[in-house]
Amino acid sequence: MNLIKNMDNELLKKLGIIIGSVIVLIIILLIAIIIFGGRLSYSQIEKRMVSAAEEYYADHKDELPQVNNGVVSISTDKLVEEKYLKELTKLTKNKNDVCSGQVSVTRNDDLLFYSATLNCGDNYETKKLKDVIAANVVTSKDGLYQYNDTYIFRGENVNNYVSFADKTWRILRINSDGSIRMIETTKRQATPWDDRYNSDKQYNIGINDYNVSRIKEYINTNYDEIKKNDKAFIIKQNLCIGKRSKNDTINDGSIECSDVLNDQNVGLIQINEFALASISDKCINPLDPECTNYNYLANIGSLWTQTADRDTSYKAFRFSGSATVTNTVNYYQARMVIHINSQVNYVSGDGTVDNPYKFN
């Protein structure tokens, strides 16, 4: 009996130790949850900021931008003050973080694009795609060049690939406002620039007025293929549709931008951009054969531009390796050129074809 009693006492002791250990562990877990519960990574905090801003503007619709490309911003302090967001110090995993931030909202028709910017000093700062790209400027050979108040990619082998809307694109330029101008790499079915009846030639050879062209209709139809959520990243652009003579040698865009079509979702590449992409010092006129040298656009496909010929009523510029002026009724590809909001956040990638830039 004594032996059984001693065994029971030993068993009870062990059970007590196990139960006590479990209770202590539960207490430790509860304390950890109280202290660290709700702590988020920096990217999760950015998402939380966007959600808070969406809730705030759902209750304050009158404060949203009312015009296309209009932008408003709200600080995290305001979101905290209005009870839409916890204090950032209570959200970060690093208790010593001192963070601030804001959320910007841009309108594109009926779509709203929200972008968070978070700054936690040396520990973390949101990276914008435009800034990541612009950090790699060169002054010779292939790469990104500063050009007036913009940045353009020039040369034959440039790391300007970006993944967006289930497609691969190539960045042409970072605009002066920080928006990113890019062209799709998707191969398209060839299409005429225009095929209307031309009274000057008295047959259907086309009219080279971009405003009423078939190619404008075609490119807008292609834009409709982009998913609604992705369209929120795109901002309106002013299309430079000025006509150009085949003898013109000014390539800074001033000729093309002598006539502008405002507030468009999508356009085509300009012929001057083909010339600017070459780093050959012998590329003076876009039609010069030397413009095909050291030029990544010379290998991108057989493409129409949105630039029409000033010397006729029925020709426009295109390039397929080299550039030329041709009848608008001829068939070549038309690829979308869009502008992406300057506030998109860098996620990953180095711009190579195998590791394109990604953003959110």
Image: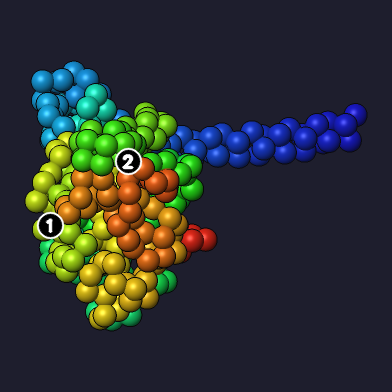
- Residue at numbered disc 2: 205
In the rendered image, residue 89, in percent from the top left (x then y), is placed at 25, 44
Q: Amino acid at mark 2?
A: Ile
Q: Which residue is mark 1?
A: 255
> Which of labels 2 and 1 is toward the front?
2
Disc tally is 2
The one nearer the camera, 357 or 298, is 298
Q: Residue at x 26, y 80 (%)?
A: 282
As measured in the structure, the alpha-carbon distance from the residue carrying label 2 to the one carrying label 1 is: 25 Å
Classify 28 as above or below 126. above
Helix, strand or loop at mark 1: loop
Work out whether residue 139 can be spotted: yes
Please identify the quadrant where the N terminus is shown. Answer: top right
Q: Amino acid at mark 1?
A: Ile
Identified at 23% across, 70% down, the residue is 285
Mark earlier in primary sequence (2, 1): 2
Q: Position of residue 225 (x, y in %)?
A: 42, 32
Q: Nearer the viewer, residue 346 or 2?
A: 346
Q: Position of residue 60 (x, y in %)?
A: 14, 20
